[in-house]
Image (tube, rainbow, N blue to C red):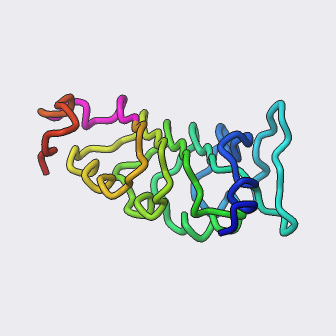
């Protein structure tokens, strides 16, 4: 990717915001209009968003089937996706598709139905992940939930 393309894809851009849309399946994003904010979204010549942030919070998603494909339809540079908000959905696990976004630095998963603490280990391959939220999931009740991050998480 050229420096110009990278500069045109920015975290400073407003998020592509599909929050509070009662979305049940990821494929619905292709027919749903994102929420509008104070600043307009910028788009490439192909019509895809130039943002690095995707907000899907407060919906009714229970899986991320076709997530990569749909994201590639929505974002000009899906490989630069840095912030995904999936909070307050019905996810029961951490889908491995999230580990394919190597520039991901913020991942909100709080308020879901994630049951196994071992699910979090999948995210260890994300070198830039700096902010992860998991509170409000059943895993909060598991022994070891609040251990220092340098310790191994039980399977």
Q: Note whether residue 74 is visible.
A: no
User: Residue 140: within the magenta?
Assistant: yes
The answer to whether residue 124 is left or right of residue 67 is left
Point 13% across, 45% down: residue: 152
Assign the N terminus to one quadrant of the image: bottom right
Magenta-highlighted residues: 133-142
In the figure, 48 relative to 42: above or below? below
Task: Provide residue 98's location: percent of width, then percent of height.
Answer: 44, 58
Q: Is residue 48 left or right of residue 18?
A: right
Q: Is residue 130 above or below residue 127?
A: above
Q: Residue at x 40, y 60 (%)?
A: 99
Q: Position of residue 77 (x, y in %)?
A: 66, 63
Q: How many marks?
A: 0
Quadrant of the rendered image containing residue 115: top left
Q: Residue furthest front?
A: 3
Residue in the image at 61% along x and 43% along y: 55
Residue 2 in sight in this render? yes
- Looking at the image, residue 148 sits to the left or right of residue 37; the answer is left
Determine the residue positioned at 83% across, 30% down: 38
x%, y% of residue 113? 36, 41
Q: Is residue 7 left or right of residue 26?
A: right
Residue 93 colored in magenta in the image: no
């Amino acid at each position: 990717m050229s420096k110009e393309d990278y500069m045109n894809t920015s975290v400073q851009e407003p998020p592509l915001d599909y929050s509070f849309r009662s979305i049940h399946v990821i494929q619905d994003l292709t027919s749903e209009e994102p929420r509008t904010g104070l600043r307009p979204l910028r788009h490439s010549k192909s019509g895809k968003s130039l943002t690095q942030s995707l907000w899907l919070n407060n919906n009714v998603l229970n899986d991320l089937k076709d997530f990569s494909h749909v994201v590639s339809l929505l974002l000009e540079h899906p490989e630069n996706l840095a912030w995904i908000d999936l909070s307050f959905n019905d996810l029961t696990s951490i889908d491995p598709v999230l580990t394919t976004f190597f520039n991901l630095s913020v991942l909100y998963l709080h308020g879901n139905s994630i049951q196994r603490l071992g699910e979090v280990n999948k995210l260890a391959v994300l070198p830039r992940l700096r902010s992860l939220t998991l509170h409000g999931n059943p895993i909060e009740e598991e022994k070891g939930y609040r251990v220092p991050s340098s310790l191994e998480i039980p399977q």
